[in-house]
Image (cartoon, grey):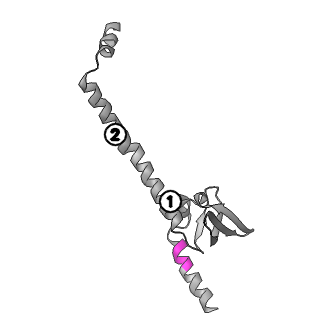
Amino acid sequence: MLTLFLQAAGGSSPMMLIMMGVMFVGFYFLMIRPQMKKQKQEKNFQENLKVGTRVVLTSGLHGRIAQIQDDGFVIETLSGKLKFEKAAVSREMTEARFGDKAKSTDKTETATEEKK
């Protein structure tokens, strides 16, 4: 049994290098690429937010965007206005909680405010 392990560790065959290459490519497509895609979607979501959009932060705080600044958002909650970094807004939590209602609600509220 010990001789089998010694024989396997002794030579570096081209087949072993090919298998390591296949493992690297597999890791890239199964782990690295989906994570990069998710980060890109999160960044696009945060960059495309507008004033009045209902959001959920990573901490679980629910609110509406009152102002957009260079370094963050001012979120209006029931207890007042708070400033948060852009990275604190969660795309997954917002879509899970509000879905498409967040954007459609903004349009109806904007129309209601314009009438007043």
**Residue highlighted by disc 1:** 43
- Residue range of the region highlighted in magenta in the rendering: 102-106
Helix, strand or loop for the magenta stretch, by majority = helix
Q: Nearer the viewer, residue 39 or 100?
A: 39
As shown in the figure, which amino acid type bears the numbered disc 1? Answer: Lys
The percent coordinates of residue 15 (x first, y second) are 24, 26
Task: Tell whether 82 sits left or right of 114.
Answer: right
- Labelled disc at residue 26: 2
Q: Residue at x 24, y 25 (%)?
A: 14
Query: Closer to us: mark 1 or mark 2?
Result: 1
Quadrant location, the C terminus? bottom right
As shown in the figure, which amino acid type bears the numbered disc 2? Answer: Gly
3 part of magenta stretch: no
The percent coordinates of residue 92 (x first, y second) are 52, 58
Q: Quadrant of residue 17?
A: top left
Q: Quadrant of residue 60?
A: bottom right
The percent coordinates of residue 98 (x first, y second) are 55, 67
The percent coordinates of residue 68 (x first, y second) are 61, 70
The relative height of residue 77 versus residue 93 in the rendered view (above or below) is below
